[in-house]
């Protein structure tokens, strides 16, 4: 469905945002919704860390904010069942990971086929993992970037939805590069979410194919 054909009366789709930390990408999503650049509502913000700034941001925006402590559950599957119950209670269409520091198991991933997105601060498949910014600098890369991809069973691995490149200047520090990457992330993630919510992509094995000529 393209934005032109999208019914004005169709319900605004709910998304969940999972984040363990600062939640600046969550903030960008909330801002994009407020500015009507993203037609969605944040039905749930979930954190696995008590006191995550993301929860505060969610509450300030009037979104449901939940801290769910993995230690309160006997198994990973029991924990993920609880997450599923929270998402399903809000009729969540998409789950957007934004700095969620926990691997989701195949059990969870298969429950939401092509309905979980992640944002990663590198041009995958280069520099996967938790230190992508540091790793790109240490490698001496001249270009890095941002990837939004569907989540599959492996870390930072699923089909790529959108990417944007960022140049690494001479004398770049980890902090300055992170700032540049964040600036790109805040634009790219809401656009990618809209693309998927509008049904404008389909997945063919590893490839994400745009249904229209539109590209974010
Ligand atoms: C982002 O840089 C994202 O790419 C990575 O985790 C970081 C989360 O930052 N997956 P924030 O919590 O959104 O500020």
Image (cartoon, helix red, strand yellow):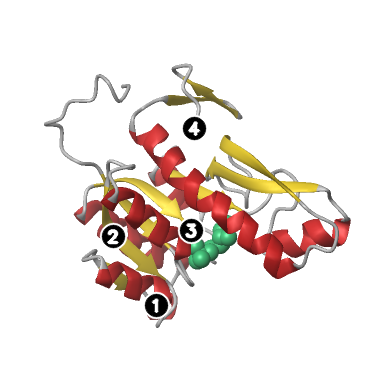
Task: State which image quarter holds ligand 1.
Answer: bottom right
Residue on which the image places disc 2:
44
Is 2 in front, or is 43? Answer: 2
* Real-space Cα separation, disc 3 to disc 2, in angstroms: 13 Å
Mark 3 crowd level (few <14, some 14–19, many ≥20, 10 Å Cα): many
Sequence order check: which comes first, mark 3 or mark 4? 3
Establish whether ligand 1 lies closer than 8 Å to the Cβ of label 3.
yes
Is 17 in front, or is 89? Answer: 17
Residue on which the image places disc 1:
69
Where residue 164 sits: x, y (%)?
Answer: 62, 40
Where residue 77 sits, quadrant-wise, is bottom left
The answer to whether the residues at label 3 and label 1 have Cβ atoms under 8 Å apart is no
Label 1 residue SS: loop
Label 4 residue SS: loop
Asked if one can make out residue 190 in the rendered structure from this viewpoint, the answer is yes
Sequence order check: which comes first, mark 3 or mark 2? 2
Sequence order check: which comes first, mark 2 or mark 1? 2
Residue on which the image places disc 4:
216
* Real-space Cα separation, disc 4 to disc 1, in angstroms: 36 Å
Residue on which the image places disc 3:
98
Where residue 196 sits: x, y (%)?
Answer: 40, 34
Mark closer to the observer (2, 1): 2
94 is higher (above) or lower (below) than 58:
above
Quarter of the picture containing the N terminus is top left
* Real-space Cα separation, disc 2 to disc 1, in angstroms: 16 Å
Name which residue lies at 26% across and 71% down: 60
**Side of 214 relative to 141 (left or right):** left
* Real-space Cα separation, disc 3 to disc 4, in angstroms: 19 Å
Mark closer to the observer (3, 1): 3
């Amino acid at each position: 469905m393209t934005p032109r054909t999208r019914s004005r009366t169709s319900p605004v789709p709910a998304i969940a945002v999972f984040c363990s930390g600062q939640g600046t990408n969550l903030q960008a999503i909330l801002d994009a919704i407020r500015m009507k650049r993203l037609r969605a509502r944040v039905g749930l913000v979930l954190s696995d860390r008590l006191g995550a700034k993301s929860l505060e941001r969610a509450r300030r925006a009037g979104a449901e904010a939940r801290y769910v402590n993995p230690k309160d559950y006997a198994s990973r599957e029991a924990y993920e069942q609880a997450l599923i119950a929270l998402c399903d209670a809000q009729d969540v269409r998409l789950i957007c990971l934004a700095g969620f520091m926990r691997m989701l198991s195949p059990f969870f991933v298969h429950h939401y086929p092509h309905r979980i997105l992640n944002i990663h601060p590198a041009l995958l498949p280069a520099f996967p993992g938790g230190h992508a910014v540091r790793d790109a600098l240490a490698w001496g890369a001249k270009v890095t970037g941002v990837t939004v991809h569907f989540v599959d069973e492996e870390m930072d691995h699923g089909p790529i939805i959108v990417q944007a490149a960022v140049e690494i200047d001479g004398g770049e520090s980890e902090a300055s590069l992170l700032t540049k990457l964040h600036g790109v992330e805040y634009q790219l993630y809401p656009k990618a979410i809209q693309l998927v919510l509008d049904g404008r992509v389909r997945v063919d094995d590893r490839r994400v194919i745009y249904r229209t000529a539109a590209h974010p």
